Image (cartoon, rainbow, N blue to C red):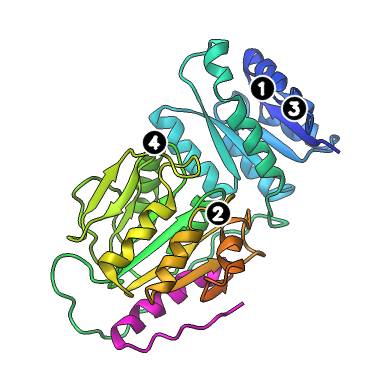
Amino acid sequence: MPIRVLVVDDSAFMRKLIIEIINAERDLQVVGYARNGEDALKKLGRLQVDVITLDVEMPVMDGLETLKRIMSEKPLPVVMLSSRTRKGSETTMQALSLGAVDFVSKPAGSAAPELDSIAQELVDKIRCAAMAQLPSKRRAPVAVEKRPLPSLPPVPPGAASRIVIIGSSTGGPKAIEEVFAHIPENLPAGIVVVQHMPKEFTRSFAERLNSLFPFPVKEAQTGDVVENGKVLIAPGDYHLIISAERRVQLNQEDRVMFLRPAIDVTMERLPEVYGKNIIGVILTGMGRDGAKGMAGIKRAGGITIAQDRATSTIYSMPKAVADEGNADYVLPLDKIGGVITDLVSALDSGEVRHERLR
């Protein structure tokens, strides 16, 4: 049976193009379209739908309000269509936090050849979204009491001597928010995040996280130092490497598995710099980026964590790590931040235990 898609867009031209792109695929079928959010909610009441494509900017009821209603009343996988403007990227970050599975950024122009350029990305993300695991209802954000860290020996000023590297893809932005909700602001380790995301969106992603949490979060730039209690986000379209001086180096070398940034590129160099003082984390995502990097971290004596199947939107990347025996911990999403905090503390005391928790 084909994947049944509802197309929601206020532009007749865009609806026509998106419908043609989707219906050109044998395994996809448009079962309906809507001109705005209010129209979409009515259609959802009578159509059997597997995936929704949802425009961000619409009259009557915009994409964000529509998404909130969908996720609270009848959660379905949603792929947002967003402009590449600053406002569009900020709104997209809100949509991912609200539960959208993924997004496609539309070219600035409205000519058919430019819009055709997103065709393959769109159908690939619809297929991926159809496999997504969603909660029966969107959970309200849980207020988390920050746990104070135990007293630790003073950390030398400057660069961090321990690092937490987090890799994620589809479903990752929302998952990262959940992880960060359980991490205190004084964590004695640097944190680097590699999230598969286009270059127009990583700055807005970093700024959103910076506004939500008590520790500083920024999009990484060449020369940035990995410091305790600070988070660096790999910028879209750049691989990120940490040098021996514990500074960020960005490059645009060849894509790895069609990806840039690639999680493996960042992870594979870390043992040279940090030895065993690494905590590697792979969250939800399609593919197997991060599997090689996590294997290298484990060989070096670092600690590895994979998100579990039940809480992953797409259990492909963490599954690759777990199936190859390279996950010391396989954990539900709401436990990962607390375990990271405890493990960073244990790195100082030398009491780290490598154990497989499932």
For the point 66% across and 43% down, the residue is 128
Whether pointer 4 and pointer 1 mark residues with C-beta atoms closer than 8 Å, the reply is no
Please, is residue 113 above or below residue 36 in the view? above
Q: Position of residue 120 (x, y in %)?
A: 61, 28
Whether pointer 3 and pointer 2 mark residues with C-beta atoms closer than 8 Å, the reply is no
Looking at this rendering, what residue extends furthest in the top direction? 111
Q: Position of residue 259 (x, y in %)?
A: 46, 42
Q: CA distance from mark 3 to mark 2?
A: 25 Å
Q: Which residue is mark 2?
A: 288
- Over which residues does the magenta segment extend? 332-358
Of 334 and 142, the residue lying toward us: 334
Q: Which mark is residue 18?
A: 1
Q: Secondary structure at mark 4?
A: loop
Q: CA distance from mark 1 to mark 2?
A: 29 Å
- Disc 1 or 3, which lies upstream in sequence? 1
The quarter in which the N terminus is drawn is top right
For the point 49% across and 66% down, the residue is 143
Is 357 in the magenta?
A: yes
- Disc 3 or 2, which lies upstream in sequence? 3
- What is the crowding at mark 4: few (fewer than 14 residues within 10 Å), some, or many (at least 20)? some
Q: Which residue is mark 4?
A: 199
- Disc 1 or 2, which lies upstream in sequence? 1
